[in-house]
Image: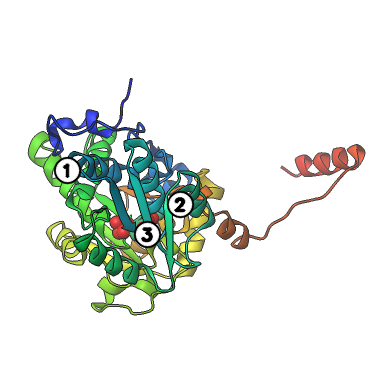
Amino acid sequence: MYEGLLKQYKEYLPITDKTPMISLAEGNTPLIPLHSLSKELGINLYGKYEGLNPTGSFKDRGMVMAVAKAVEEGAKAIVCASTGNTSAAAAAYATRAGVKAYVVIPDGKIAMGKLAQAIIYGADIISIPGNFDEALKTVRNIAETEAVALVNSVNPYRLEGQKTAAFEVCEQLGKAPDVLAIPVGNAGNISAYWKGFKEWHDIKGTLLPRMHGFEAEGAAAIVKGEVIEQPETIATAIRIGNPASWKLAEAARDESKGHIDSVTDEEILNAYRKVAAQDGVFVEPGSAASLAGVIQHVKNGKIKPGETVVTVFTGNGLKDPDTAINATDVKISKMSDLEEMRLYLRNGVSEL
Ligand code: F0G
């Protein structure tokens, strides 16, 4: 039976005899071939569907490790700032480990599904009038004086857990991809994947991919080379103007001969709709940023025809139903009459 990341990758993680082996069976997520988009773009495109983790995002990988280490070190409470997914994962793993979670969120700027998760898992939820960057600054400050373990990705155990996704990609493909495309918000995940690919290269001899990271244009601090004071994007998960792992992300880009570029909200929404409608995968808007980037890079030649590309679908589309409904022309035909429905279907099917 699969028992989660701490057991699966024990020898590659900072686990001691005293580390509690907590698990919600996170990780082991599918690598889905995207047939329709592959054909359209002329590449071999796969989606690493992290939305199938127990709380619906990749954050579970890092959180299981960070919470286990916090408990090992005697913490009774954890704290994080979040655009939503980190808080959901922190809340779930705190419950699992029997500690308290305090989560700090930007007021009104998190998707409804994510808020529902923090509520139902029983976290103590604090909302602030500022954005994620301000929330992160606050919790970093608080964790210095109070007896709470900080579980944002500035906690190195988070990146340790998250690097396992790169191991899985290599195992599932039987090799490293040519390109790993990934959304960039606080820049922890791109740094974690790169660490994972380098370690797998050292241990198993797999090659190294080029890392292609994508920020939302209204929050593109790394691309613009400056802090964005008021980041804005429809992809609230990556609405971050001062990424904590900025330097690590630039190192991942440069060492891998990759790129960090930006995509507009329009490109994000286009990719978001396309992957659901053409390949049957529902991801959250923040996750569609990297697919939008792949489309952009095929057009501008940064991705070559025939290359093997893995795009990371960091979170599940169900997290943010409001955006799904608002981003499409919703067509629901109201019908209560059986004959009317029969005719409707007959006409529809005859046109196929
Ligand atoms: N995709 C999703 C769905 C996310 O929730 C995040 C970050 C990212 C991508 C970007 O990853 O920050 O490692 O570069 N969400 C954080 C949160 C900030 O609070 O849930 P990153």
Instruction: Give the spatial CA distance, label 2 vs label 1.
Output: 51 Å
Q: Residues within 10 Å of mark 3 (few under 14, many from 20)?
A: many
Figure quarter occupied by ligand 1: bottom left
For the residues bearing labels 2 and 3, Cβ distance under 8 angstroms? no
Residue under pointer 2: 40
Name the element at disc 2: helix
Disc number for residue 118: none
Name the element at disc 1: loop
Q: Quadrant of the N terminus?
A: top left
Residue under pointer 3: 82
Mark 2 is on which residue type?
A: Glu
Number of numbered tags placed on the structure image:
3
Instruction: Give the spatial CA distance, label 1 vs label 3.
Output: 23 Å
Name the residue nearer the viewer: 97 or 198: 97
Q: Position of residue 337 (x, y in %)?
A: 91, 41
Residue appearing at x 45%, y 50% in the figure: 118
Q: Residues within 10 Å of mark 1 (few under 14, many from 20)?
A: few
Instruction: Give the spatial CA distance, label 2 vs label 3.
Output: 36 Å
Residue under pointer 1: 73
Q: Is residue 300 left or right of residue 163?
A: right
Q: Is residue 27 above or below residue 90?
A: above
Residue appearing at x 88%, y 43% in the figure: 336
Q: Nearer the viewer, mark 1 or mark 3?
A: 1
Q: Nearer the viewer, mark 2 or mark 3?
A: 3
Mark 3 is on which residue type?
A: Ser
Mark 1 is on which residue type?
A: Glu
Q: Is residue 107 left or right of residue 210?
A: right
As drawn, the residue found furthest toward the top would be 1
